[in-house]
Image (cartoon, rainbow, N blue to C red):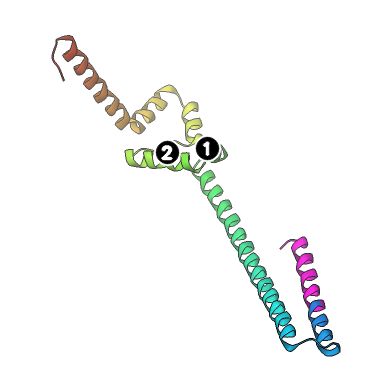
Amino acid sequence: MSDDFKKITEAFGQAVISFQKDVEYLGDHTNVSDQFIDRKNKILFHHINYQKYIENHIEELYEARKLMKMHITSLTAICVMHGIVDYPTFLLRGKMLLVSRANELQKEGRFQMSYMMNQKLKKLPESEKSMIESILFRDTDREIKELLVRIKKRKNSFVYGIGT
């Protein structure tokens, strides 16, 4: 926890103790009713419980923050291990766009090549690069060819007056 929070917590604790002593003094040295003392004691009780709750909650948040940092470090390491060194660029796109793109790729049975893989491919001789790309993009090439055939058929059917 931060030093500021610790200082504020200590000051709050001292204020509660001071308030408690003032209530005891009033009870011992003045003619105040027992109801008045009881109300002040209830206020003290609620202040103390609230402070305990806040301290516990902040401790839980602090632990969750440590866990999140650990997960972020692990996910960063996983990205680097898989050749995704441009992950900061992806993070700038925002959650909605990233999730949308991931869902789209998954639905289509595709993937996005990592930055490091692309860099490796660029360094290969053209023949090796073409061979690897033909393997990786075989399905995409087939789909593009099928689409072009459908477009050509549609174009020809319009040219010859055949409606679709």
The percent coordinates of residue 152 (x first, y second) are 22, 16
Residue to which mark 2 is pinned:
101
Quarter of the figure with the N terminus? bottom right
Instruction: Look at the numbered disc 2 and give the secondary structure of its residue.
Output: helix
The percent coordinates of residue 40 (x first, y second) are 73, 80
Front residue of 154/139: it is 154
Magenta: predominant secondary structure element?
helix
Q: Does the magenta stretch include residue 11?
A: yes
Q: Which amino acid does label 2 sit on?
A: Arg
Residue drawn at (80%, 77%) of the image? 19
The percent coordinates of residue 136 (x first, y second) are 36, 33
Q: Does residue 158 sit above or below 26 in this rendering?
A: above
- Asked whether the beta carbons under mark 2 and mark 1 sit within 8 Å of each other, the answer is yes
Q: Does residue 133 sit above or below 109 in this rendering?
A: above
Q: Earlier in the sequence, mark 2 or mark 1?
A: 1
Q: How many callouts does the rendering have?
A: 2
Front residue of 107/10: it is 10
Q: Badge 2: few (under 14), some or many (20 or more) residues near its Cα, within 10 Å? A: some
Q: Does the magenta stretch include residue 90?
A: no
Q: Does residue 161 sit above or below 115 in this rendering?
A: above
Q: Badge 1: few (under 14), some or many (20 or more) residues near its Cα, within 10 Å? A: few
Quarter of the figure with the C terminus? top left
Report the side of 20 relative to 72 (left or right).
Answer: right
Residue drawn at (82%, 82%) of the image? 21
Front residue of 59/106: it is 59
Report the side of 157 relative to 90 (left or right).
Answer: left
Q: What residue type is labelled 1?
A: Arg
Span of residues in magenta: 1-18
Residue to which mark 1 is pinned:
93
Distance from the alpha carbon under mark 2 to that under mark 1: 10 Å
Residue 119: image tag: none
Instruction: Look at the numbered disc 1 and give the secondary structure of its residue.
Output: loop
